[in-house]
Amino acid sequence: MGQEFVQLSLTPMLIGILAAVACALPGNFLLLRRQALIGDAISHVVLPGIVVAFLFTGTVSAWPMMIGASLAAIFAVVLIEAIKRVGRVDAGAAMGVVFTAMFADGVLLLELSDTSSVHLDVEHALYGNLESLIWLAADGWGSLADWTALSEMPPQVGRLALVLALVSGFLFAFWKELTISTFDEGFALSLGIRARLIGFLLVVTTAVAAVAAFDAVGSIIVIAMFICPPASARLMTNGLGHQVAWSTLFAGASAILGYVLAGYAPLWLGAENSVSAAGMIATVSGFILGFACVLGPKRKRIGAAREV
Amino acid sequence: MENFLSALFLQSGYNSALVAIGAALLGIAAGGAGTFIFLRKRALVSDAAAHATLPGICLAFMTMVALGGDGRSLAGLMAGSAISAAAALVLVDWIVRETRLPEDAAIGAVLSVFFGFGIVLMTVVQNMTAGRQAGLESFLLGSTAGMLFNEAVTIAIAGAAAGAVLFLLYRPMTLVAFDPEFAATTGIPVRATDLATMGLVLVVTVIGLKVVGLVLIVAMLIIPAVAARFWTERVDRVVLIASLMGGVSGYLGAALSAAHPQVPTGAVIVLVAFSLFVVSLLLAPARGVVASVFRHLRFQRRVHLRQGLLALARDEPIFDRLTLKVLRGEGYIRGDGVATLQGRATAANALRDEARWEVAREMHLEGSLSGRFDGLNAIEDVFTPDEIRELDRQLGGRIAVVS
């Protein structure tokens, strides 16, 4: 078990967990600010960003693409805001207009430019390739202490760890400001907190998390992890700190369970091939949310008038 | 270009003509149905429905293969996708009603989980040995290359059915979109109407799978409706314009991609729709950006003119460049800033009207005129001549201005 597990499963699992948690953390605040679908929009517009970065640099290297994708995400958010204000259109519709048009643009660019020689296609963008991020240099658990083997790890591990640190650092540093401006923007402004700036920084953090995760695991997990673990956590508790903790737990659990179910369960059942790990992680997070919806101790809405 | 023109006039072969007509019909149905979810402010619910078709497609394929069929019958796949999209819509509705989660979270959760599950099923299908599964990915982004006649007919029939439902339910859907509580008091079943609207969305989504693909079909529902909203304030016209824009985008997009076969049809259609949206955003008469800029400039000019005239009448120096320019443009001051005769007369009138307004404000304290004191409405437009005489009488000797 040891060597094979470390070689083939440890890094995909680790990447899955890192990506899931990096997305779930900012997702908590997006959920409370009614911006849950920003994650959806961002994960669509990442595609044109990556394609444009590829056209500029001509290579499939990680950093230019991550920069391109982040710029595309920020551009999309600014465009959504502009259409909302200038056109007096509600947020959902403005978002729908922008991200579909940009995604279509990405598809078009991808098909028109000569990207056939490189590994860049829409399907890959949608569901990533978690299973392929293996660590061949490892020959057992001992490799974790071996520098030469560690340096052969898929680079996504390091990048995602860095991004996760960045995201947690942002939440930790601006915890008070984020909390107050999320629940009561007027109060935040009266305290001298620059609530709009905080909101924008949150979106930028979200974009960075989405792009880093997207690179490793595709956009499905990104959307699912932004929304499902925080939403499940929201049904478990009324405390923001507890909610963040629960969402981290749910995100990690989805990643581990999803990977195991996708990679091993079909083989146990006698099938020959494993199924998509990204899709399975999203599915598991959905099941967790389903349980939370039925059993979560704080699942009901209290006090608020019910909408027609 | 030549290819494009011949495709535009249905001259470049049977298949492209079929695709163009199918895409136009789809666009018309999508524009009409999309208007109502847009007005109901639930545009992104359709995104959940669209992504949720994927597991249905895969399950339908597996079922058909298990029953010994080919697995690629469009009608069967459409039925499967309709069932799973309907399940997603029911789930979104259930989550919003039964838990404290807001609608956007419910939409996002259902969308991503269904899509993720669909991807899992797709990898299962890809590993299946039976059936010709190669075509399933084409539903992600649509593929019109090998469209068959009976597929086009399926799209046409479903589009016509959607149109008929739209026509029959036009009134209740409008009422529910604008004021669900009022609609409920007039006896309209709000939930049933919402369900019917969602049903329409479902039909459009399912027929759009073949042409535009499930990732982008939501664009066909949202973009024409948002664009149409810029041109008019009336629902019936929004529906008509949105259908028209949807139809034009479908047709033009299909023709464009027929001329350049390597370009995916769905993306082109969406980009044509987006161009129409940009044109609407900029150029629409009342709500467009250009119109608002003009309105703002006109307003700015009027404010500067009024303030400049009052300053002239009170012999105050004017420093503001724009004010000087406006006054000069009207011929009220000379190049060196000295008031002309006409300028002095108009300024005196402005000052007198200002005094009249002051009296009027005292007389009409109840605020029935609020918003009209802004100094930009001519007093003659608000009061009758005898009212103005009464204002002047009350003014008496307070101000010495010859009219």
Image (cartoon, rainbow, N blue to C red):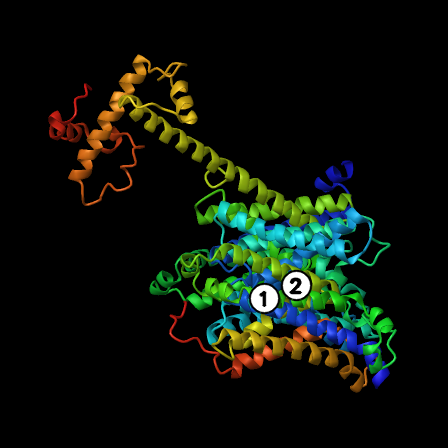
Residue at x-position 36% and y-position 26%: B305
Instruction: Kindly report the distance in space between the C-alpha atoms of the residues bearing marks 1 and 2.
Output: 8 Å
How far across and how far down the image is residue B261, in percent? 79, 48
**Image height of A266 relative to B331, above or below:** below
Residue tagged 1: A26
Which residue type carries mark 2? Ala
User: Where, by quadrant of the figure, is residue B53 drawn?
Assistant: bottom right
How far across and how far down the image is residue A47, in percent? 71, 56
Chain-order first, disc 1 or disc 2:
1
- Helix, strand, or loop for circle 2? helix
Residue at x-position 41% and y-position 67%: A307
Residue at x-position 87% and y-position 71%: A148
In the image, B245: left or right of B41? right
Residue at x-position 52% and y-position 46%: B228
In the image, A255: left or right of B390? right
- Helix, strand, or loop for circle 1? helix
In the image, B56: left or right of B169? right
Chain containing mark 2 = A
Of residues A307 and B78, the one nearer the viewer is A307
Chain containing mark 1 = A
Of residues B87 and A11, the one nearer the viewer is A11
Task: Determine if residue B203 is in view.
Answer: no
Of residues A236 and B180, the one nearer the viewer is A236
Mark seen at residue B305: none
Q: Residues within 10 Å of mark 1 (few under 14, many from 20)?
A: many
How far across and how far down the image is residue A154, in percent? 81, 68
**Image height of A5 relative to B377, above or below:** below
Q: Are marks 1 and 2 in contact (CB under 8 Å)?
A: yes
Which residue type carries mark 1? Pro
Residue tagged 2: A209
